[in-house]
Amino acid sequence: MSRAAEISVAVAAPRTSAARRGRWWGRKAAVAAAWWVASVALFAGLWELAWAAGWAPQLLLPPPHIFLRDFSSQARYFDTSDIGRAQAAPLLAVSTTILATLLRVLAGLSLGFAASLVTGTLIAQFRVVRGLVLPTLTLLAPISPIAWLPVSIFLFGIGNAPAVFMVFVGVYFVMTLATISQINGVSETYLNVARTMGATRRQTFFQVVVPSILPGLLQTLRLNLFAAWMVVLLAEAVGVGSGLGQVVMLARNTFNASLVFFAMTLIGLTGYLLDMGFRQLQRRLLWWQPASSGGGR
C-alpha cells in the first residue's frame, strides 16, 4: 500500500467511527423519545378514559384535553404586567414565568454546590475546621428547607433572594456531607502514586482527588435537583412576586382546577428538560467515563 493510501485510510477511520457513534446516539435518542411518548400517552389515555367513564369529575380532575385546549385563557394568569399596561402575549407570559423559576433554581444550585465543595474540602483536609464546623453542620443538616422559609423572609424580605436562599439551603448541607464522604473515600493507592511521582498537595487535590469525587458529587447533585425544584415552588408561593409556584397558589385560591393541572404540566416538563440538560452536562464534564457508567447517564 502506498504512503498516500495509508494516510487516506488513517483519516477515514476516525470519520467512520464518528459517524457510527452519531448513528448510535441517534438511534438511542429515538428509542428514548418513543418510550417517553408512549408513557405519557398511556398516562393521558387512562386519565381521559376515567373522565369518559365518569370516575374523574371535570370540576376537580379535568382531563388533559380540557386544561390544555385553550392556551391563551390559561396563559393570562401568568401575566405579571401592572394594571393599566398592555398585557403580554400568552407565549411570552408563560415563558417569562418559567424562566424566572428556572433561574432561581440554577442560582441556588450553583451557589450551594460551590459553597459545599469549598466547605467539604476544608473539613476533610484540616482538623481544626473539621472540629469547629462539622458538629454544627450535622446539627443543621436534618432541618427541612421548608423550616427555613420564615428565616429566609426575615433575612431577605420579598423577592428573588428568599427562593434562591431556600434552594441553597436545600443543597448546601447534603452536598457538603457528600463532599466529605467522597474525599474520605478516595483510594489511598491513587494518593500514594501521586506522592511517589512527586506531586504537590495542590496537584494531588486537583488532578487526583477532584476527578475521583466529581462523578459521585454530580450524581448527588442531580438527585437533589428535583428537591430543589419543589423547594423553589414553595418559596415562590409565599415569598416571591412571580413564578410557577405563585401561579399554583393563585389556582388554589381561586379553586381553578384547570389552571392547577396546566401549571403542573409546565412544572413537570420544565423539570424533565432541566434533568435532561443536567445529564448532558454530566456527560461533557465526565468525559473520561464510559457512556454506560452511572455518572454519565
Image (cartoon, rainbow, N blue to C red):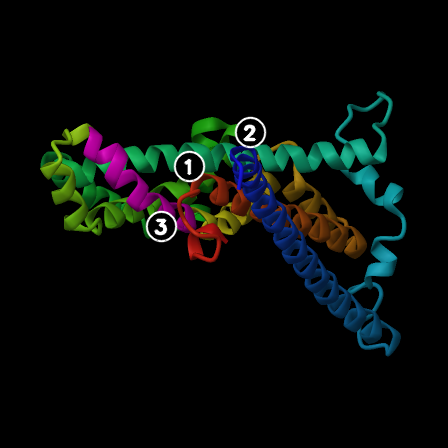
Examine the rendering and report whether any part of residue 197 can be seen: yes
Q: Amino acid at mark 1?
A: Val
Q: Nearer the viewer, mark 1 or mark 3?
A: 3
Q: Amino acid at mark 2?
A: Asn
Q: Which mark is residue 151?
A: 1
Q: Quadrant of residue 130?
A: top left
**Gap between marks 2 and 3 measured at Cα:** 30 Å
Q: Nearer the viewer, mark 2 or mark 3?
A: 3
Label 3 SS: helix
Q: Is residue 45 magenta?
A: no
Percent x, y of residue 253? 72, 49
Q: Which mark is residue 160?
A: 2
Q: Residues within 10 Å of mark 3 (few under 14, many from 20)?
A: some
Using residue 279 as the reference point, say whether residue 182 is left or right of it: left
Sequence-wise first label, 1 or 3? 1
Percent x, y of residue 43? 73, 68
Q: Quadrant of residue 261?
A: bottom right
Label 1 SS: helix
Q: Which mark is residue 51?
A: none
Sequence-wise first label, 1 or 2? 1
List the single residue furthest toward the top. 85
Q: Amino acid at mark 3?
A: Gly
In the displayed structure, would residue 38 be above or below residue 23? Answer: below
List the single residue furthest toward the front. 1
Q: Which residue is mark 3?
A: 216
Using residue 47 as the reference point, say whether residue 6 is left or right of it: left
Residue at the spot 55% in from the left edge and 37% down from the top edge: 11
Label 2 SS: helix
Percent x, y of residue 48? 83, 69
Residue at the spot 39% in from the left edge and 37% down from the top edge: 113
Total marks placed: 3
Q: Which residues are magenta?
A: 203-220
